[in-house]
Image: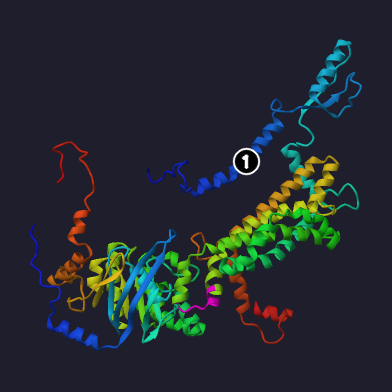
Amino acid sequence: MSPSSSPPWFRPLAGLAPRRSRQLWALSFVLPLALWSVVSYVPFIWHPMLRVTDAGDVSWLTPGELAPRADVERENQAVRARGGHPASGKPANPVFLPAPHEVARALVTGFTTPPFRQDEPWLHQSLWHSIQVIFWGFLISSSVGVPLGILCGALPAMARLTEPFIEFFRYLPAPAFGALGVAVLGIEDAPKIAIIVIGTFFQQVLIIANTTRRIDPALLETAQTLGASPRHLLLRVVVPGVVADVYTDMRVLLGWAWTYLIVAELIGVSSGITFFINQQAKYRAYDRVFAAIVVIGLVGLGTDLVLASLGHQLFPWLKTARRGWFSHAVAFARRDRTSPRPSEGAGSPAAEEARV
Amino acid sequence: METLALPSYRAQDAAVSARFARLRQRPVILDVQNLEKAFVTADGERIVALDRVSFQAHRRELLCVIGPSGCGKSTLARLIAGLEPCSGGRVLLDGKPVDSPGPDRGMVFQGYTLFPWLTVLKNVMFGLEVSQGLSSNGAELEARQWLELVGLAKFSASYPHELSGGMKQRVAIARALANRPRILLMDEPFGALDAQTRAQMQSYLLQIWREVDITIVFITHDLDEAVYLADRILILDAHPGRVRELMEVAVPRPRQPAQFRSPTFAAARRHLEELIHPPIEVAAERLPLRRMTVVGDDVE
C-alpha cells in the first residue's frame, strides 16, 4: 500500500481518512435526500395521482383537485366512448408526500406564517414548549438516575436491592401511565414530564449501572494499595473513571427522551410540537408536517453535535480530546474572574471603563 | 557442545559475603509465615496455589520471587498487598499482621494502572492526598520531588495516554513511593516492555532503590532480571506453589550491565535455570511433529 492511499473500504475497523470521513458524513444526508428528490421530481417513478387542470366531461372532478390516476383513466375511457371531452392534468404524488422544495419552503414559512387559528401556537412556540418539557423531564430523571446508576454499578448490595424491581418496571410502557398522570398531575406539562421521567429513568439506571461495572478493577486495587478508603474509591476512582462513558450514555438517552416526548404529547394535552404536527395534518398541510419533523431532527442532531463536541473538550484525558470553543470560553471566563476587581465603584460605567 | 566451567553459584567473594552478613543484621520488615492460598473451582475441585510459603525480607533488601508459570507468584504479591484473603498462615509487616490493603505496602502492577483521568502529577498526588491527608499544595510539592526523582518532572502535566510504557511504569513507581510505604511490591512491572526499555527500567529501579529507604519484593519470570536486580531470590515450585530455595545472589554490587557476562552471574543464572527448567522437562518439550519438507532440504 502506498503511503498516500486510504485504507481499504471493507476491512473491519479500518480507519477513515478525515477527508473521506467528512465526505461520507455529508453523503449520509445527501443520499436519502436524493432518493426523496427522485421520487418527487421524476414523473415516471411513482406519481400515482393526477393534479387535474381540466375536468373535461368527468362530472366528479374539479380543476386543481388531486385524483387517483387509475380512476381518472377509467372514467376518461367511459367519457371517450360517449364521445365526450376527457379530463387532463399533471401526474402528482399523494398529498402526504410533498416534494423537498415544498418542505424547504414550509421550513421557512412555518416560522413566519401565523397559525390557521388565532388560539393555536406558532411552530417555534410549539418547539420551544417541547424543548422545555424535555429539559425538565431529562433533568429530573438524570438527577436521580445518574447517582443511583453509579451507586448500583459500584455497590453490589445497592444493585441487588434496586435492580430487580427496576428490571420489572422498565417493561411497563411509559404511555400506559398517561391516564394516571393526567388524573394525578392535571392537564398541564406535569404529566408529560412524568412520562418522560418514567420512560427514561429506569433505562438510565440500568445502563449507567452497567457502564459503571465496566471500570477496570485494577484501578480500584491500585487505589486501595495507595490507601484509598471506600468513600475515596467511589468518589475519586469510580466516578471520574466512568464519567466520560456515562456522558456518552446520556447522549443516547436524550434521544430516547425525545421519543417519549412525542408519546407524552399525544396524550390529550394540546401543546408542543406533536400537537402542532397533528393540527397541520388535520389541515392537510403535509409540507408543514414534514417541516416540523425535520425541525425535530435538526434540533436533535444539533444538540448531539454540540454535546459530542463538548465531550471532546470536557474529558482531556481521552485520546479523542481536543481543545475547542468550550475551553476557550472557560479560559475567557476564568480570565475575567481572576482579573483584579476595583474595590469600590464596581459595576459603575466609570469603573468598567477604568478596567478596560 | 562446549560449555564454560562456572564457579559454584554459592561461592561469594569476601565483599559479597560481608554484605550479606550486614543484610542479615538488618531488621526483618516482611515476615511471611506458612502462607497458604487455595481456590475451589467451579467443579468443586480444590486447587492449592500456595502451600506453606515462608520467607523473610530485611530492611532495604531487594528480594526477587521467581518460578514457572502457575507457581502463584502473583498470588503471593496480592496476598502480601492484602488484595486477596489467604487460606492459612499470615503475613507480618513490622511484626503486625496484614489483612487488608494499605498505604504501607505500595504496589506496581504489570498492566498500566495510572488513573487515566489524572495528569501525571495528580496521579502521584493521589496517595498523598487520600492516605497522608496532605493538602493539595503539600501533596503537589511532594509529588514534584518524586517525579524529579524518576526523571519525569517535565511530563507532570501530561495525561497517561501520552506516555510510553516505560514512562508510565516510572510514574507508577513514583506514585507508590510517594506514599513512603514500608515495602514496594512489584508484580512483573516490566513484563510488557520491550527488551531495551526493560533494561533501562531495571537500571532506573536499582538507582531508585539505592537512594530511597525501601524494601522491594519483585516478582518476575525473567531469570536475568532476577539475578541482575536481587540480593536474594525466592524460587517457587508450581502445582502447588512451594518454596524451592531462597538463594543468595553472589554477584557484587553495584550491578552493571557488563556483569551479565561475568562467571558469577552465569553461575547464578544457570542454577536458576536448572531449578525452573529441569532437563527432564526440556526433553518433554518435543512437539509430535513429522517431516513436512522435501528430504535433503534440512535446516538442522
Query: Residues in magenta?
Result: A226-233
Q: What SS does tag 1 mark?
A: helix
- Please determine whether, in this image, residue A76 is positioned above or below residue B252: above
Q: In which quarter of the image is residue B224?
A: bottom left
Q: Nearer the viewer, residue A31 or A155?
A: A155
Name the outermost residue toward the front. B44
Q: Which of A233 and A20 is in front in this view?
A: A233
Q: Mark 1 sits on what residue?
A: A30
Residue A228 among those drawn in magenta: yes
Q: In which quarter of the image is residue A68?
A: top right
Q: x, y percentage for residue A206?
A: 62, 60
Q: x, y percentage for residue A45?
A: 69, 27
Q: Nearer the viewer, residue B82 or A211?
A: B82
Q: Which residue is drawn at 78% across and 44% down?
A: A289
Residue A104 among those drawn in magenta: no
Q: Quadrant of residue B45?
A: bottom left
Q: Which residue is drawn at 79% across and 44% down?
A: A288
Query: Is the C terminus of chain A in the top left, top right, bottom left or bottom right quadrant?
Result: bottom right
Q: Residue at x 59, y 45 (%)?
A: A26
Q: x, y percentage for residue B296?
A: 13, 38
- Residue B230 appears in the picture as rendered: no
Q: Which residue is drawn at 75% across and 45% down?
A: A291
Q: Mark 1 lies on which chain?
A: A
Q: x, y percentage for residue B151?
A: 35, 75
- Please determine whether, in this image, residue B133 is positioned above or below residue B111: below
